[in-house]
Amino acid sequence: MTETAAVPGTAAETVPADADRPIRTFHPRRGRMSSRHADAHAALWPTLGLTVLDGDRTPLDLPELFGRDAPTVLEIGFGMGDATAAMAAADPERNYLAVEVHTPGIGNLLALAGELSLTNLRVAEGDAMQLVHRLAPASLDAVHVYFPDPWPKARHHKRRLIQPGNVTLLRERLHPGGVLHCATDWPEYAEAMAETLNADPGLRRLPSTPHPRPETKFERRGTEAGRPITDLRYART
């Protein structure tokens, strides 16, 4: 993993390997980058990239990271990044902090950021919940969790991202009125998500009217497989 000592807000030293061993909510998704992705990574990672280290609790200064003070959206698990780039391009008044573990997707989003001249986007590599620990309370305008791994087997449900402890952390990072927006194409996970989110005392469910967002690759796969798409939006009270 690339070190990012020169990027504002990153740890100056490597965190010991045994400092924190979280339950992973994702499959490790290393992959081979194309030459386009590798070139974009080499050119843009020093200015747009952020490495997330397990156990690092160094406070992340968002205005310093983005070079401006603006409302910030945390995008968890962006896949190949096409939808994230589209949202950032269409929403220049907000900052987008996007976190992923899939290296080709990271390379693709960096390539898109360069092609679209996006200045309101930063790309983090690593465990999203480890990154959340570094964010100040009430520092986010929105959190997007689009099509996270459903971990369908019962013995793996503990690895699901949307569960009470994680929801508490995400809600605390939202400012009052900030929105947690989740989407999934797995009906059973949608029910579990709704049960968990409804039970959080600091969240208020928003009307289920359609909310515009770009279609993701995982959403297309779910639709093609005949699975219904469920969007769940909650505001911090």
Image (cartoon, rainbow, N blue to C red):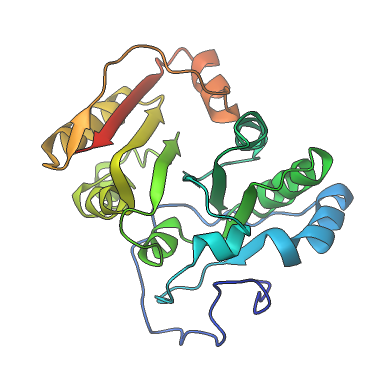
Q: Residue at x 70, y 48 (%)?
A: 119
Specify the quadrant of the image occupied by residue 197.
top left
Which residue is situated farthest in the front direction here? 69
Q: Residue at x 51, y 15 (%)?
A: 223
Left or right: where 129 falls relative to 53: left
Q: Is residue 71 above or below residue 183?
A: below
Q: Residue at x 21, y 55 (%)?
A: 165
Q: Is residue 32 above or below residue 232?
A: below
Quadrant where the N terminus lies? bottom right
Left or right: where 180 falls relative to 202: right
Query: How many numbered callouts?
Result: 0
Q: Residue at x 68, y 77 (%)?
A: 6
Q: Is residue 210 above or below residue 8?
A: above
Quadrant where the C terminus lies? top left
Left or right: where 38 falls relative to 105: right
Specify the quadrant of the image occupied by residue 200.
top left
Estimate the x, y position of residue 134 in percent, counting from the top left.
40, 67
Estimate the x, y position of residue 7 in percent, counting from the top left.
65, 71
Estimate the x, y position of residue 196 in percent, counting from the top left.
18, 38
Estimate the x, y position of residue 199 in percent, counting from the top left.
11, 38
Q: Nearer the viewer, residue 183 or 70?
A: 70
